[in-house]
Structures are given as structure tokens and as C-alpha cells.
Image (cartoon, rainbow, N blue to C red):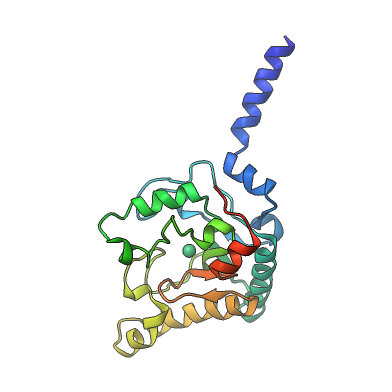
Amino acid sequence: MLLLFLVFFLSVFSESTCVYEKTMAEQGLVEVQQAIPGILVELKYATTDNFMHKNVYGCLQKAYLQKEVVARLKKAQAYLSASHPGYHFLIYDATRPLSKQWDLWNALPQYPPKVRSNYVADPAEHSIHNYGSAVDLTVADEKGRPLEMGTPFDFFGEMAYPSREKELLASGKLAPKFYQNRLILRQAMVHGGFMPILYEWWHFNAFSRLEAKRRFSVLR
Ligand SMILES: [Zn+2]
């Protein structure tokens, strides 16, 4: 009887505990929604609404980041709330286990590795996401609707490049409103201490890859 109870208890426990989330918590990473009230999370790779059209994250549904990274995000969210009351960040991706990095990499065989690494970091080199030090996100309005940014998340092409925004704006390809929305996101994130990158308006690093490798261990 006791054994039966134990088996039942263990099966219930294992169903409600995701191995990835458990590992992250054990390695000292912080669950973002617990730490920052009002922040929104929809991990796109845990849904079918992504470029692979399948759930590659499985049970991983929550956003985890390193403690220092969450502190920066909290500062950025406070800035966003002060400059645009009612606006909240909406997180699309946070810490990404290395095994999932391979899934993303292998899902883009149409791009040769050199081009592919503009969109997905080479798993052999590791992504800053694998160290819990990068976050993909947008801004949502008071009703939780994501602001228009000119492209969806994970759009592979120059319309998503922050490095090309001025040109795209001048040629009329990027609407001024969408550019302004990107600035709302970027200004808040930079204020919090994050670094934008050249190719994705939604991606921000808290540390360089070198610094992240020095400070933290990779999530596998
Ligand atoms: Zn990213």
C-alpha cells in the first residue's frame, strides 16, 4: 500500500515538474514572472507559432534568467512603466537549453552556416541564451497586445535588422510608427543595461558571450 502511494506520488510529482525548469532553478536561475510583477511571457518555441511550426520546448513554459539579468530587466520594466504607463514587456524567449539550440539550428538547413548564424547562434559556439544572459521580447500595450514592430518575432531578413532601420525608414519600407515602437523597446532595455544587436529588434544581451561564459555555466 505504501509502495502504491509512493508510485502515485512520484508520478504526480514528475508530471508537474519540468526537467528543464527544475535544472534552471537548481543552477540558481530566477523565474522572471515571479520576480517582476506584470511582465508577460509567451515562449514562442513552446508553442507552434514559430518558424518550425512545432513545439520544440516541450514542458519548458516559463522564462528563466540569471539573477543579475532579471535585476536589469526589472529596471528596464520600471523605466517602460514610467515612460509609457500601462505598457509591459512580453517575453518570447529567455534561457534556452543547449539541446534546444541544436533543434533551432537544424531547422534552418536552407541557409549555409555563415548566413544561418545571423539568425540562430551556432550551437558549437553556444548562444548567449544558453547562459541565461539574453532575452527576446517585445512591448505589449495596456490590453496585452504586442505593439507593431514592422515584422513578427523571428523574421529572417533585413526588415528585422536594427542596423538597417534608418535606411528602411527613409525608403518608406518601415513605417515611422513601427520605428517609434522599436525605440520604446530599445530605450527601456538600454536603460536597464542591455545591449541590442544588429540583426534582430527583439534580442537583447545582458553580457557579451565571453563575459557570460566567464560568469555562468551553459544550460544543457
Ligand atoms: Zn534571441
Q: Is 140 placed left or right of 4 in the picture?
A: left
Res 67 seen here: yes
Q: Quadrant of the N terminus?
A: top right
191 or 122, which lies in front? 122
Residue 20 higher or lower than 188, as above or below: above
Name the residue at 52% across, 65% down. 137
149 or 24, which lies in front? 24
Q: Position of residue 35 (x, y in %)?
A: 71, 59
The residue most toward the left is 110
Q: Position of residue 216 (x, y in %)?
A: 64, 59
Name the residue at 40% across, 61% down. 120
Name the residue at 33% across, 84% down. 168
Q: Position of residue 121 (x, y in %)?
A: 43, 61
Res 46 seen here: no
The residue most toward the right is 2
Q: Is 176 placed left or right of 81 in the picture?
A: left
Name the residue at 38% across, 64% down. 119
